[in-house]
Image: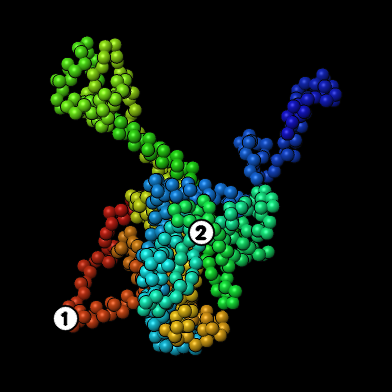
Amino acid sequence: MNTKSLFRPNPVDRLVGWIDPVRAVKRLRARAALSYIDQTTGYVTGGSPRRSVRGWNPFARSADEDALQALPDSRASSRDLFMNTAVASAALRRIRTNVVGSGLTLQAQLDRETLGLSDEQAEAVERVIEREWRMWAGSSNCDITRTDNFEWLQGLAMLSVLMNGDAFVALPYLGVQGNWPYSLRVQLIEGDYISNPNNLPDTGLSLGGSLNAGREGIVGGIEQDQYGAPIAYWVHKAPFGLTFTNAGTWTRVPAYGGESGRKNILHLMERERIGQRRGMPLLANVIGQLKQLTRLSEAELMAAVITSFFTAFIKSDVQPGGLMDAFTEGESVLDQSSGNDSAGRSASKKDDNLQEMGSGSVVELGEGQSVDIADPKRPNDSFEPFFNAIVKEIGASIEVPYEVLMASYQSSYSASRASMLEAWKFFKRRRTWLANKLCQPVYEEFLTEAVMLNRISAPGFFDDPAIRAAWTRAVWVGPGQGQIDPVKETNAAKIRIASRLSTYEDEYTAINGGDWEAAMERLSRQERKLDELDLSAPEPEPGEQEAGVETNPASDDRGG
């Protein structure tokens, strides 16, 4: 908008200004306001003439164009923050622990109506399936590296997705080894190893020229069809000792088997935009805040350390070394007996102009020398409130409240529980995602091989996809939510069950996680044992349940 032209008077304005100057000024103001209204919209956006957003010029691009160009640097930054920043490490580990814990547990739930099974028959088959699954998933033989069992592979896969944006899982059959009956293996692949062959640029995202001839469908190492469905994945295999950024070979792995139609590769990614081909790290949009927060913490720590040093500077006309003998308690910068300074350097090589501060150091100054000590005012009283404010902003971005992120439950019971419930929504969503993306597909592959080996009887498994889905139906149970005040929350669970608002299984899973039926069977055996020994379970103290005994110091409702 050319503001000069708005306020340049035309002949009519000059005439009006000669007759009535005030009226002429009003005409110019009205013309400027009308021009401003014509050039702006109802929403304040980038590129708007408003002063608050002047200089902000965002571009509308596709999901791949926005993500893929920044993905390598985002991955590297996310990993560095995880390794060297306490808040970033706490965020990713906290999510991994609450979502996966020690691993999601299989609970087979056959579609009894479709399969025509009675409750007794279905429960018997489910026990056989779960027993066979525990044997396979609980052994490191399921891992292609023979390092972890499937429960720990879940945690590794989740942490890799959070840190790197996505991960890939191959399900090869390697043949029977020893007396191990199964050939199925799980192979986790870090996202960096899925890339364009020969590191060619992504088609449509940059000028590839003739180098991309015949590779028009490959973007981010994923080859897609005209509808956006994956056809193949290009896996980079680098020579030993080299990283995925160096030379190597690429293997084209079809997304689905040609004859079987089974998935060869599972892509663990949560899309945030339509058409997005690769995932972004969870911390991608708070990398800047985390890095600055780390620098601030390190600066405050260094300032506090320096402040803790007590160093005496002595100015005297006496020759150096004269007054030093009078101080026997302190440790001087230069150890006279060894000829080495506090850093272990030779005294002959020490810079005479360099003086080091330390705990209880005494330093003599030469004639005409003086020292001015700056008072850093540490510790900084405003550091903790500012630090907490930034952490709260980071927690809001990744959907983990501050109290859960920092494991700091110092407010009222109501506020702490509200934070836990809000975080639990995110954890449950991620758990469902992990079950659908990883656990259930791997379980279906396992059950397929188990049926083929006649270790599990499943009539009609290969005849009809609907029957196959009935046999493979299952739920995945993870760690429980936990309790802040066990008495209050246990009583609330009893009320929900008595009011038919919940079930025993739902309440048990929410509090403890795991298999409710297995827990009830263990409880039944224990109660029978107590009866045999003529023992009785301890009864609660009178009035304990009614009073709602506090069991957590943070559970009082101070102002909550």
* Badge 1 element: loop
Q: Is residue 438 above or below residue 336?
A: below
* Residue at 42% across, 88% down: 121
Say what amino acid the circle numbered 1 marks.
Asp
* Residue at 41% across, 38% down: 295
Distance between the alpha carbons at the discs numbered 2 and 1: 66 Å
Q: Percent position (x, y) of residue 308?
A: 27, 32
Write down the quadrant of residue 328 in the picture.
top left
Q: Determine which of the numbered discs, if any, sits on residue 534 in the image.
A: 1
* Residue at 64% across, 40% down: 57
**Quarter holding the N terminus?**
top right
Observer-nearest residue: 346 or 2?
346
Using residue 506 as the reference point, say whether residue 538 is left or right of it: left
Q: Determine which of the numbered discs, if any, sits on residue 353 in the image.
A: none
Write down the quadrant of residue 261 in the picture.
bottom right
Using residue 118 as the reference point, say whether residue 358 is left or right of it: left
| Nearest to viewer (mark 2 / mark 1) | 2
Q: Percent position (x, y) of residue 462?
A: 54, 83
Q: Percent position (x, y) of residue 259?
A: 59, 77
Q: Is residue 355 above or below residue 208?
A: above
* Residue at 52% across, 51% down: 246
Q: Is residue 305 visible?
A: yes
Q: Determine which of the numbered discs, if any, sits on residue 237 in the image.
A: 2
Q: Percent position (x, y) of residue 49?
A: 68, 36
